[in-house]
Image (spheres, coloured by chain):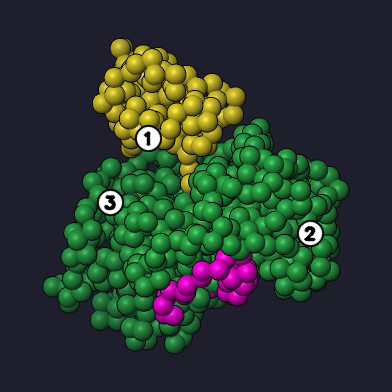
Amino acid sequence: MAELKVGDRILLLDEDGFLDNAADWDEEVAHVLATTEEVELTQEHWDIINYLREYYAEFGVAPMVRKMLKDTGKKQSEIYTLFPSGPGKGACKIAGLPKPTGCV
Amino acid sequence: MAKLPKKDELLQHKFDVPKTDWMDTPVEFKPGTYCYGAKAKNLEIVNFPNARDWSPEDEDWKLPEDWKGTIIEGISDYMSKYRSFRLFMDVCVRCGACADKCHFYMGTGDPKNMPVLRAELMRSIYKRYFTTSGKVFGRLAGARDLTEDVIKEWWYYFFQCTECRRCSVFCPYGIDQAEITIMGRELLNLLGLNTDWISGPVANCYIKGNHVGMEPQAIMSNIEFMIDDIETITGKRINPSFNRKGAEILFVAPSGDLFAEPGIFTCMGYLMLFEQLGLDYTMSTYASEGGNFGFFTSNEMAKRLNAKIYAEAKRLGVKWILGGECGHMWRLVNQYMDTWNGPADFLEEPISPITGTKFENAKSTKMVHITEFTADLIYHNKLKLDPSRNDHLRITYHDSCNTSRGMGLLEEPRYIINKVCNNFFEMPEETIREKTLCCGSGSGLNAGENMELRLRGGFPRANAVKYVQENHGVNVLANICALDRASFPSLMDYWVPGVEVMGVHELVANALVMDGEIERTLDLRCEPLPEKGVKSDV
């Protein structure tokens, strides 16, 4: 399993670079995950990340993409501009959410 | 993750005779054609053996100490349990009728993807350890020793088969290659060898009732979101029902329809139909998955996951079960559920409360497919439909492997589509109905890291879609499977851009005239409907 060095901590990542343990996430981790996605975090990114964190805390899963767009007032293209790998593999990864699985 | 090749690079494979005999050709793990290994944490949740983190790229797969004995004992065990397995090992005459029928062989040119040879990977071991000729004559009799390389070869090729059973349609002996792949995967699971994309959903489903891992509040919130959109489209507020005791019908959908596009539009279709009918139904937030990735690990795991459907039907006290547009769910309902989890003698034989039709075919399972239910409604003129609302769509229909070959559901979806749309075009005859070509991602192969394999395996299907796109201007690929809805968008974008993917009940609800609705100006995706009388460009 790949590793992510955050300060003094060594965190495990899965093959796609998602946190192996969602509980490892904090803002410092988000900054380091963002570098793996070649994203420099601005307030606009943080608005999305904070939304995803809050949603995940309440529902235990990532939001539907359509719901994410409606709740954040963003268009899909704007999400891709902020997170080039997209809502799942970009935004959710940096926000420390697990990958969606199944027939999705 | 492997970089995706360009279209012409994917089409350069040859179908030449290989330079070396298949037994002397070692397996080569090509990036983009295999999935990640199953994680320890997910195997531990369901008490599967040899839980550890591993990668197929590692030299050492960390097999358990007596792995060879485990496999041979496993074969012996399955032989005694499943007569089909021994039969299929014994009766093949290598006629080759199946060879070019497999979408993975067509798409990769790899001889080990010929069904006959994929089966031979297993048959050679059976011969060596279970037949006299194989024990005495070895390779001369088509037998070979079981080694770690054989296990790696099995893992690579048994996860390059989607268990679609197209080959079995053409086999003069009726050998079901899917059964061989299923046995191969069963044996591999004895050694803790599965994929991350299968074992993750299995663990989720075991804990939370669905592959996505949605808890009740997530399911209800997603449905609430869909209901908001339905209100925008129709002006009507829908009242869903969850976990309601005493409802007449339990409705079970694949969880992809509760979470991801374009499945959620199919789910909106179900909700609108039930509302219009005033159907006395409920949805369970625990039996919240029709699909069953357990089936891609072992028979026993599939049985464990499937049990929740009858358990919830019993707890809620419903009369019968209605199931949504899911693929492998229906193969399991049709072929396994009754003996796995039945008899469902606490349920009644399903009767449509709207038409009075008795679904004789569901007499034992008590579970009716939604296209059977809806086709019956339309046949009895119980729905007011305006197919012109789908006039901007030019539709073709993909038979899911599982609903067509696994349960013979061929006419009902077509009947519905023809009633709710004016522009329906079939793909070529040898690519539909029981000869349907697989999406290339079934049986849990719909991961991201094996995208090249999926695009290769899906190429024959995409090519048939391209044919109707070029000849009839087709812009919609309709289907009745959540895995199709998940996997086809990327396949279409790659091979046939401009073709959208839709569940049949999305088309139904577009056409459905609901009592008291506002004049529709939006389709189920909240896109503007074309003005009346405007046809699509061809």
Q: Does label 2 lie on the same chain as label 1? A: no
Residue B444 location, x and y as percent?
A: 45, 54
Image point (78%, 56%), residue name: B277
Q: Does label 2 lie on the same chain as label 3? A: yes
Q: On the rendered image, what quadrant is the N terminus of chain B found in?
A: top left
The crowding category of the residue bearing disc 1, from other C-alpha atoms within 10 Å (few below 14, some 14 to 19, many at least 20), is few
Looking at the rendering, the stretch of residues picked out in magenta corresponds to B405-432
Residue B91 location, x and y as percent?
A: 43, 84
Image disc number at residue A77:
1
Q: Amino acid at mark 2?
A: Trp
Please give the chain letter of the residue carrying mark 2: B
Residue B3 location, x and y as percent?
A: 23, 46
Secondary structure beneath dot 2 equals strand
Residue at which label 3 appears: B32
Of the numbered discs 3 and 2, the one sitting upstream in the chain is 3
Q: Nearer the viewer, residue B502 or A85?
A: B502
Residue at which label 2 appears: B320
Image point (80%, 43%), residue name: B244
Q: Colour of chain B?
A: green
